[in-house]
Image (cartoon, rainbow, N blue to C red):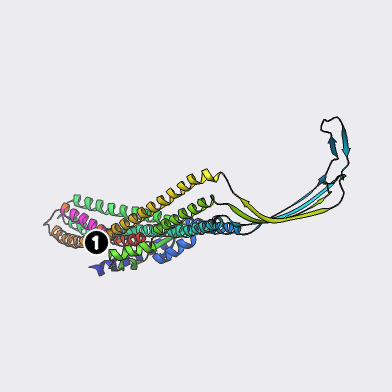
């Protein structure tokens, strides 16, 4: 039974690819190749990839805090004469000063202690970089699952088309036989008209299915970055994948290790702890080494001023303390502590959600196989019922309405089997996505 269905499906898809080839460029695409195309061409992944580059650059910027700061200045201008008054402003005099001003200064400083703020800023930037990488992995999983959904939707429509085409062929043969009986006066023209109506409905279903395939193809082409006229033919071996012997405990272990949401939640907790350390650094003084040199003309610290270049340099240790941190830091620190607690709670919640998703996906996976087995048995009964009713009808032992009911039951059973086959594959990928190993 399964072998016959596989042969029928393969031949039907081959016929579909031949039809597609007459209209557009047809290409048999495996799911692995679809994943590779999405990784290479998908616009959303390219945007996320740029976020990684930005995060890496921010890490490099944070490292600059370890380097000394160097500044220089050059001033050239005009100095007026000095105006001098006695304290009572009763007498005034003008002291001449050389008018050409030239100043050149060079200063350098390096922080040697800031309560670990610089190192923690670098650590936070690296954690943000790791989150960006994990976000890319998460988006990649999401894009892959989107590819799976669109790919299987196309597959579902292709299989349904095969069902409609095969039943259209049977309906034409049946109509020929009914027309022969009608010419012999055995059946009425009403039977011919109703048979033509069934055939017309099946042909319309084929056209609608073709339209749905074209729409889904365009959607998948957009995700994969392919031309709009590319018609993608599903790989017939995809439905031949055997049933996985998964254990829920093993799946949960994999999820705890691989799931990107859990990894991101853990990194966000580390970021919250690092923010707390940065906040605590505000309570400590900042110690820096500094050195500077200043070259100036004229020398104005003598009377009269002298038109000469003079140079002084300075070096030492600078200690700065923000007195406002005494009343500001406790509130900032409390906020940071609350954020750490919130991150812990988010991590716990995310773990619960992932475990729930894994268990749900596993139940749906087993349910999909149960459905498939049930629908296959139903199909076998429907085909046997159709064979018996058709034979009775042509022997004038059953009415056309009985044959129509048997036909509809058979078509419905075939469609249920087709959908169940796709649901088995879809539910398998749901398990992989839940564990983070798609």
| Foreground pick, 135 / 81 | 81
Picture quarter with the N terminus: bottom left
Callout count: 1
Dominant SS type (magenta): helix
- How busy is the neighbourhood of tag 1: few (under 14 within 10 Å), some, or many (20 plus)? many
Residue pictured at 31% horizontal, 53% vertical: 205
| Foreground pick, 210 / 249 | 249
Residue 410 lies in magenta, yes or no? yes
Q: Mark 1 = which residue?
A: 372
The local secondary structure at tag 1 comes to helix
| Foreground pick, 404 / 8 | 8
Residue 154 lies in magenta, yes or no? no
Residue 282 as seen in the image, left or right of residue 393: right
Residue pictured at 50% horizontal, 56% vertical: 128
* Residue 312 % position (x, y): 77, 54
Picture quarter with the C terminus: bottom left
Above or below, comparing residue 188 to residue 381 in the picture: above
Residue 285 in view (yes/no): yes
Residue 163 in view (yes/no): no
- Which region is colored magenta? 402-415
* Residue 340 % position (x, y): 43, 52
Query: Extreme left residue here?
Result: 397
Residue pictured at 25% horizontal, 57% vertical: 416
Examine the image and state in which quarter residue 249 appears: bottom left
Residue 334 as seen in the image, left or right of residue 310: left
* Residue 202 % position (x, y): 28, 54
* Residue 373 % position (x, y): 22, 63
| Foreground pick, 47 / 177 | 47
């Amino acid at each position: 039974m399964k072998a016959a269905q596989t042969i029928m499906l393969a031949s039907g898809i081959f016929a579909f690819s031949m039809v597609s080839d007459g209209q557009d460029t047809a290409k048999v695409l495996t799911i692995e190749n679809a994943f590779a195309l999405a990784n290479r061409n998908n616009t959303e992944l390219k945007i996320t990839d740029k976020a990684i580059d930005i995060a890496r650059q921010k890490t490099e910027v944070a490292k600059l805090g370890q380097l000394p700061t160097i500044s220089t200045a050059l001033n050239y201008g005009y100095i007026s004469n000095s105006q001098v008054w006695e304290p009572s402003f009763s007498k005034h005099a003008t002291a001449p000063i050389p008018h050409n001003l030239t100043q050149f200064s060079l200063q350098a400083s390096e922080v040697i202690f800031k309560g670990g703020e610089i190192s923690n800023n670098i650590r936070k930037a690296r954690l943000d970089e790791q989150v960006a990488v994990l976000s890319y992995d998460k988006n990649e999983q999401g894009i892959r699952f989107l590819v799976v959904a669109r790919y299987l939707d196309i597959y579902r429509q292709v299989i349904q088309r095969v069902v409609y085409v095969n039943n259209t062929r049977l309906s034409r043969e049946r109509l020929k036989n009914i027309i022969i009986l009608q010419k012999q006066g055995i059946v009425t023209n009403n039977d011919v008209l109703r048979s033509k109506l069934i055939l017309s409905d099946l042909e319309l279903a084929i056209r609608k299915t073709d339209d749905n395939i074209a729409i889904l193809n365009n959607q998948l082409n957009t995700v994969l970055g392919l031309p709009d006229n590319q018609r993608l033919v599903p790989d017939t071996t995809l439905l031949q994948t055997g049933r996985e012997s998964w254990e829920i405990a093993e799946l949960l272990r994999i999820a705890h290790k691989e799931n990107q949401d859990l990894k991101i939640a853990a990194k966000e907790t580390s970021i919250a702890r690092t923010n707390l350390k940065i906040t605590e650094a505000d309570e400590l003084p900042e110690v820096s080494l500094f050195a500077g040199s200043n070259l100036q003309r004229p020398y104005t610290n003598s009377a009269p001023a002298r038109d000469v270049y003079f140079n002084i340099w300075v070096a030492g240790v600078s200690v700065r303390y923000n007195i406002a941190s005494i009343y500001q830091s406790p509130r900032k620190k409390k906020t940071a502590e609350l954020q750490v607690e919130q991150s812990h709670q988010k991590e716990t919640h995310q773990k619960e959600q992932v475990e729930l998703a894994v268990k749900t996906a596993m139940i749906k996976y087993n349910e999909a196989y149960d459905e498939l087995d049930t629908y296959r048995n139903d199909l076998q009964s429907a085909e046997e019922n159709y064979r018996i009713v058709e034979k009775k009808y042509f022997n004038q032992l059953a009415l056309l309405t009985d044959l129509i009911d048997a036909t509809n039951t058979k078509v419905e059973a075939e469609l249920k089997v087709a959908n169940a086959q796709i649901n088995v594959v879809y539910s398998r990928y749901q398990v992989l996505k839940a564990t983070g190993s798609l």
